[in-house]
Amino acid sequence: MIQEIKPIRDRILKGGAQKYHDKNAETKKFFARKRIELLCDKGSFVEDGLYANCLDSELPADGVVTGLGKIQGRAIALMANDSTVKAGSWGARTVEKIVRIQEVAEKLQIPLFYLVDSAGARLTDQVEMFPGRRGAGRIFRNQARFSGVIPQICLLFGPSAAGGAYIPAFCDVLLMVEGNASMYLGSPRMAEAVIGEKVTLEDMGGAKIHCSTSGCGDFLCATEEEAIEKAKCYLSFLPQNYRACLPSVAGSDPERPVTDLKSLIPQSDARAYDMKQVIKTLVDKGSFFEIKELYAKEVITGFARLDGKTIAIVANQPLVKGGVLFVDSSDKAARFIQIANCYSIPILFIADVPGFMIGSKVEKEGMIRSGAKLIYAMSNADVPKISLIVRKAYGAGLYAMCGPAFDCDATIALPSAKIAVMGPEPAINAVYYNKMAELDPEAKKAFMAEKIKEYEANVDIFKLAGELIVDQMVDFHEVRTELIQRFGFYAQKHQDKDRRPGILPM
Amino acid sequence: MDSHDESWLHVWRLIMAIIKSEMAGTVLEVKVKVGDTIKGGQEIVILESMKMEVPVSASQSGKVTEVKKQVGDFVNEGEALIELA
């Protein structure tokens, strides 16, 4: 007798029991298959392993949907936990399906999406799913090995607990839905039992905490639709894999006219201003796509388009903490530079930086360790790099923002640019400390004024251009055109794809 | 302390807010005084740090109940500047 496929398939496609669907609906969570429908082009999804555990009516697809689809015509692979089946927990077949779709994505060299909503390991299956060669550890191993080879994008719609929390951690980018997404190694209940801490889930591992404080999350999204749209937008800047060409679109004029740039830079060196407005005068209208917007805001990281072509931007933000580089902002910039480098995205550094933060607080936090990571990542990025010096580039800040010594393809200075080991006052204090201690206040002031004048003449930006330290000086309204032309030429730059990675400092 | 006091303390903690410094520096200007009503986002203190003027804004609206630092004081990252109720 030949059995009918349809009744079994229909049962599996419905997922878990109705009460779990209802529960999801109450918290504005979509069914896993609905999420796939929203993510992929209509009718493009082809599924693998639909019949995993099909003889057990309690385990449709074993709680995970895997397969291939298209996003705006581009092939992608995906896995989506089904939280209506045993809370999306991982059984033996679940893990095998995830490992297989990872292998498929690697074989086809296409981006891989992880739609995560899972309670973690299914304890009843632990021997089959946890310790072995193709156990859950293999998922993380694959993620780590495919890192920088194919884009890996995680959308977190629900919990991602204990070991499961490492799926988002190993992705290039993490989008989290506020109120539903959470990541933690031990639940609040466990924290209370083991260490005595009383804390809510939202406070310990909620989306907001991870996107603003821990730095684990990149995008805080109000709804699942928003997370899915943002994930598609993210993909639109990236190639299919590390060897593929970058996508490009038709170019457009910037949101703010290029002539606005001059008025955005304050006369006083100490005054704050909003670097995001500067970016709006440079890149194609509406193209700036900020990553980790809520985290370590003194540095801005994001993709944008310049005449239709993808670039990565690392910019100091004088509006927050004076634009000084801290521990978290250094880590944030370092990681973003690595993403850009892996996918051959040219990097524009926009510098206005007083330097790395000093003081006992940051030294204890490992300022040197994180600062070194940033300089390491930037040095090892061999994509086209342009450093635009808007105002200050002081001390190691110049180095971090891709100064001339770091194979910068061009250091471009605006007339407001200043490059020095440090600002005039601290420099003069350091050099003439003993002499100034002997002077009375009046004489000290006059001495300082005179020395500041000398100091500024010595590091005058035209003098530095004369010494060939900066490659080009441009007027404010000329920057955009200069960048478009130069990135056009530098696209030819040779990248050594076979170079072995070094050791991340400290 | 009876349970009535405790619940009051709880309410007080909820309505009181402390505005802290995000980085180490010296107080350059205090733009509010005790009794002022301020709005979330309003600049309340300007610090000088790394030779930059660093504005500190209120994270929420409220009435200033205490100014904890004066012009010229050193303030470390995370230290309280202003208390609101």
Image (tube, coloured by chain):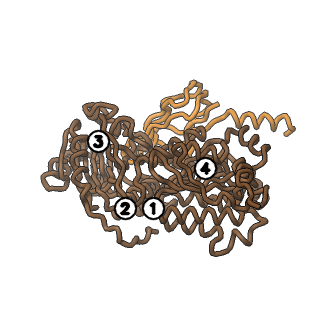
Chain colours: A brown, B orange
Q: Which residue is mark 4?
A: A156
Q: Residue reaching furthest bottom?
A: A133
| Separation of residues labelled 3 and 2 (CA atoms) | 22 Å
Specify few, some or many for label 2: CA neighbours under 10 Å numbering under 14, 14-19, or 20 or more: some
Residue located 31% across and 43% down the image: A306
Q: Are marks 4 and 2 on the same chain?
A: yes
Q: Which residue is mark 2?
A: A243
Q: Kindly indicate whether the residue at mark 2 contacts the one at mark 1 (C-beta within 8 angstroms).
A: yes
Q: Earlier in the sequence, mark 3 or mark 2?
A: 2
The chain ID associated with circle 2 is A
Give the amino acid type for the residue marked by disc 3 in the picture.
Asp
Q: Which mark is residue A109?
A: 1
Task: Tell me if residue A80 comes above or below residue A249 in the rendering.
Answer: below
| Separation of residues labelled 4 and 1 (CA atoms) | 23 Å
| Separation of residues labelled 1 and 2 (CA atoms) | 9 Å
| Separation of residues labelled 4 and 2 (CA atoms) | 28 Å
| Separation of residues labelled 3 and 1 (CA atoms) | 27 Å
**In this rendering, position of residue A370 left or right of residue A28:** left
Residue located 28% across and 34% down the image: A261
Residue located 15% across and 50% down the image: A463
Q: Earlier in the sequence, mark 3 or mark 1?
A: 1
Q: Find numbered disc 1 in the image and state the secondary structure of the residue it sits on.
A: loop
